[in-house]
């Protein structure tokens, strides 16, 4: 069974631009969660989508948004990029049921903002 | 967001030694997960725990869900060089699918 895939793997943008990252979950998984990982803050939860609806949201500004499609694929968008947005963005998929909610991560997208 | 207290922050051990690390939280969790992350890659799930007191093994790895439901432990026996990496704990209070992550334990194994 294929794992979680994320595209692109690496991205370089400049301040003020916007970026869209993509995540394809494991087949059969309906929940996709997004995390930001930086050396200083560690893994921080951005949001979670389940069946095309945002179910949980972390403490990030509105510049960070996401969506999920009917095939469970998810995209994350960051508008008006800032230098501090440079990070590894990880998505994780799970079945989404509370009793079996172990999450499997993709390889991440390394975003560098210049 | 909430973060879990994970210790130790780093470990330098000789090949063949056993390793122990733990995570504590001020909140009760219903799920504990342990991950290993190599540089530039996503975390890989090692062990999942769902019941207080549960003890689960995966090869040389053993993890326990603390009785208080506020902590978890990971042990690695007879460490080998490929155990090198950063180990993370993650806990979920079962409100939806939101997980909180520990700050990580960096493990170095000296051959």
Image (tube, coloured by chain):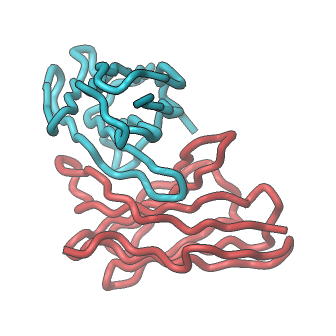
Chain colours: A red, B cyan
Residue shown at 13% from the left, 26% from the top: B54
Query: Where does the N terminus of chain A fall, quadrant-wise?
Result: bottom left
Residue shown at 80% from the left, 78% from the top: A17
Direction from residue A12 to residue B35 in the image, left or right = left
Count of numbered marks: 0
Q: Is residue B23 above or below residue B38?
A: above
Direction from residue A45 to residue A105 in the image, left or right = left
Which residue of the protein is positioned furthest toward the front in this rendering? B111
Which x, y percent locates residue B47?
Answer: 23, 40
Which residue of the protein is positioned furthest toward the top in this rendering? B68
| Quarter location, residue B73 | top left
Residue shown at 39% from the left, 22% from the top: B14
Q: Is residue A47 visible?
A: no
Which x, y percent locates residue B94?
Answer: 30, 41
Residue A48 versus residue A88: which sits nearer the camera? A88
Which residue of the protein is positioned furthest toward the bottom in this rendering? A70
Q: Is residue A110 above or below residue B5?
A: below
Residue B56 versus residue A76: which sits nearer the camera? B56
Which x, y percent locates residue A55?
Answer: 41, 59
Q: Is residue A25 above or below residue A71?
A: above
Direction from residue A104 to residue B6 in the image, left or right = right
Query: Where does the C terminus of chain A fall, quadrant-wise?
Result: bottom right
Residue B6 versus residue B98: which sits nearer the camera? B6
Residue A40 versus residue B94: which sits nearer the camera? A40
| Quarter location, residue A23 | bottom left
Q: Is residue A49 visible?
A: yes
Residue shown at 58% from the left, 39% from the top: B1
């Amino acid at each position: 069974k294929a794992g979680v895939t994320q595209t692109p793997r690496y991205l370089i943008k400049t301040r003020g631009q916007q970026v869209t990252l993509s995540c394809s979950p494991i087949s059969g998984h309906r929940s996709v969660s997004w995390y930001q990982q930086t050396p200083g803050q560690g893994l921080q939860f951005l949001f979670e989508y389940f069946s095309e609806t945002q179910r949980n949201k972390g403490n990030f500004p509105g510049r960070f948004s996401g969506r999920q499609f009917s095939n469970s694929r998810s995209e994350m968008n960051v508008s008006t990029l800032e230098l501090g947005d440079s990070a590894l963005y990880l998505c994780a998929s799970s079945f989404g049921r509370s009793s079996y909610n172990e999450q499997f991560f993709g390889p991440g997208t390394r975003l560098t903002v210049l | 967001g909430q973060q879990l207290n994970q210790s130790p922050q780093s470990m330098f051990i000789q090949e063949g030694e056993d390793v122990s690390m733990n995570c504590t939280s001020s909140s009760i969790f219903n799920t504990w997960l342990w991950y290993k992350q190599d540089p530039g890659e996503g975390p890989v799930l090692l062990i999942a725990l769902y019941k207080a007191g549960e003890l689960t093994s995966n090869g040389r790895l053993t993890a326990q869900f603390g009785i208080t439901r506020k902590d978890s432990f990971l042990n690695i026996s007879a460490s080998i060089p490929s155990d090198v990496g950063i180990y993370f704990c993650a806990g979920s209070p079962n409100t939806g699918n939101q997980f909180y992550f520990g700050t990580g334990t960096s493990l170095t194994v000296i051959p």
